[in-house]
Image (cartoon, rainbow, N blue to C red):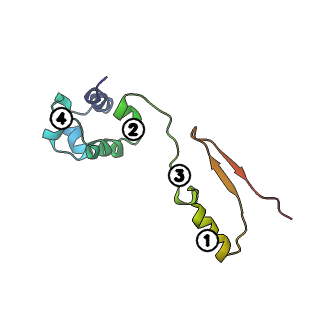
Amino acid sequence: MLIQDRIRTIMKSGNYSASEFADKIGVKRSNLSHVLSGRNKPSLDFLVKVINAYPKVNASWLITGEAREETPVPSKNDVTPSKEEVQEDSVNHSKEIEKILIFYQDGTFDKYTPNQQ
């Protein structure tokens, strides 16, 4: 299934005409027409607009045609600090570790808490 066919599937699921769909996602009608005809490939901005308008649509499916499990996006606090940041914190501050989180590629995680004495 081509990407324009996947876009048509989204349109059909909402029972939208091409002009209604273009208005809903916020693109020019001619832009949508060129994508649907296969004349142009959809831009990243176009795809982002579709995904924002239809948050239940799997982004991987829309782009590649293959649905993948969505993995949670790590927050700023979940990112592992660099060795320099760890050394800087240990030199400048005496902080106690509350918990350690390890995130795996399959979307699962382990949580470790140090023994409280």
Q: Amino acid at mark 1?
A: Glu
2 vs 3, front mark: 3
Where in the figure is residue 73, as x and y percent of width and height? 50, 49
Q: Which residue is mark 1?
A: 88
In-front residue for pair 2/104: 104
The answer to whether residue 21 is visible is: yes
Amino acid, disc 2: Ala
Q: Which mark is residue 18?
A: none
Q: Is 77 left or right of 56, judged from the image as shown?
A: right
User: Relative to 26, is 13 above or below?
Assistant: above
Q: Looking at numbered disc 4 in the image, what kind of residue is underneath it?
A: Asn
Identity, as a three-letter code, of the amino acid under mark 3: Pro
The alpha-carbon separation of the residues under discs 3 and 1 comes to: 23 Å
| Sooner in the amino-acid sequence: mark 3 or mark 1 | 3
Residue 77 lies in what quarter of the image? bottom right
Separation of residues labelled 2 and 4 (CA atoms): 19 Å
Give the class, few, some or many, for how many residues have Cα within 10 Å of label 3's Cα (few <14, many ≥20). Answer: few
Badge 3 marks a residue whose secondary structure is loop
Q: Which residue is mark 2?
A: 59
Which residue is painted at 35% across and 46% down in the image?
A: 52
Residue at mark 3: 74
Instruction: Find disc 4 in the rendering and name its residue.
Output: 40
